[in-house]
Image (cartoon, rainbow, N blue to C red):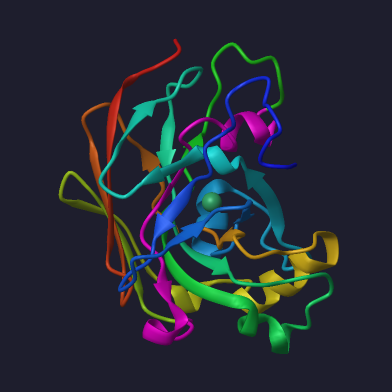
């Protein structure tokens, strides 16, 4: 598209994330998510504990919510859950990345929330489906600032903890991930060409639960600071 091209409707805004220690920002291309990646969370969900294949889905790019912002309580659920996760963000990619080369494509890491409509009201589908409606809705991807690899390395262990209104709800360690970051990148790249700007949410530990309007969630991961998100009034209902 040339600069002179006229758009029929306003161009979508490119979501970006702040980068710690830099005036530059990280532009978000796609948001990939891995489900059921900590055994204790698989157990609390009553899921299959086999390590056959990671569960993969996406969220829309424009579902990003910034650290410190208020996110609305979404429509069509009365069971709106937090899932605190480590995110890896990509500086490059491609197809068929070997696990041993995967980390060389990572720009940095941060904290994110995979917000989930655990149940859907008036939705005539099975209890586990459809994932799009449960996972890929507006404002479903709060993301904290990006910490470059040069500052924090590649976190493979460290405490991951979520408080809601000052009460600890999730408290685990990154070392308990079933699929490690290099394996996730390698697997995703067999199906998609990973590119600069892609975010990968790596799954939540146990302790997931509901939030209501007025609740404040504060997530933390050792070396990656905190992510603070308030739940606002309902929208769309
Ligand atoms: Mn998740």
5 versus 64 height, above or below: above
Seen at 37% across and 84% down, the residue is: 151
Q: Residue furthest front?
A: 4
Q: Is 140 within the magenta?
A: yes
Nearer to the camera, 47 or 167: 167
Is residue 60 visible in the rendered image? The answer is yes
Seen at 45% across and 13% down, the residue is: 236
Question: Residues in magenta?
Answer: 127-156
Q: Quadrant of the C terminus?
A: top left
Q: Is residue 102 left or right of residue 138?
A: right
Q: Position of residue 178 (x, y in %)?
A: 60, 71
31 versus 40 height, above or below: above
Image quadrant of residue 146?
bottom left
Nearer to the camera, 176 or 73: 73
Q: Position of residue 153 (x, y in %)?
A: 44, 86
Q: Residue furthest bottom?
A: 100
Is residue 204 visible in the rendered image? The answer is no
Nearer to the camera, 195 or 57: 195
Q: Is residue 65 left or right of residue 193?
A: left
Q: Is residue 136 left or right of residue 53?
A: left
Image quadrant of residue 172?
bottom left
Q: Position of residue 96 (x, y in %)?
A: 84, 74
Q: Position of residue 87 (x, y in %)?
A: 50, 63
Seen at 32% across and 69% down, the residue is: 20
Image quadrant of residue 234?
top left
Q: Quadrant of the N terminus?
A: top right
């Amino acid at each position: 598209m040339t600069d002179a091209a006229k758009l029929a409707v306003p161009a979508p805004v490119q979501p970006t994330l702040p980068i710690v220690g830099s005036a530059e920002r990280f532009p978000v291309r796609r948001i990939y998510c891995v489900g059921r990646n900590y055994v204790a969370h698989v157990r609390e969900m009553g899921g299959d504990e086999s390590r056959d294949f990671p569960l993969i889905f996406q969220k829309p790019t424009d579902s990003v919510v910034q650290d410190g912002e208020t996110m609305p309580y979404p429509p069509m659920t009365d069971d709106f859950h937090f899932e605190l996760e480590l995110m890896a963000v990509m500086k490059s990619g491609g197809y068929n990345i070997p696990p041993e080369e995967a980390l060389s494509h990572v720009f940095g890491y941060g904290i994110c929330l995979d917000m989930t409509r655990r149940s859907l009201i008036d939705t005539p589908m099975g209890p586990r489906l459809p994932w799009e409606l449960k996972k890929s809705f507006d404002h479903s991807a709060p993301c904290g600032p990006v910490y470059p690899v040069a500052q924090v390395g590649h976190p493979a262990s460290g405490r991951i903890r979520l408080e809601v209104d000052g009460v600890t709800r999730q408290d685990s360690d990154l070392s308990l991930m079933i699929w490690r970051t290099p394996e996730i990148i390698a697997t995703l790249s067999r199906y998609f060409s990973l590119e600069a700007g892609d975010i990968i949410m790596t799954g939540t530990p146990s302790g997931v639960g509901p939030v209501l309007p007025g609740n404040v969630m504060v997530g933390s991961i050792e070396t990656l600071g905190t992510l603070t998100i308030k739940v606002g009034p309902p929208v769309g209902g």
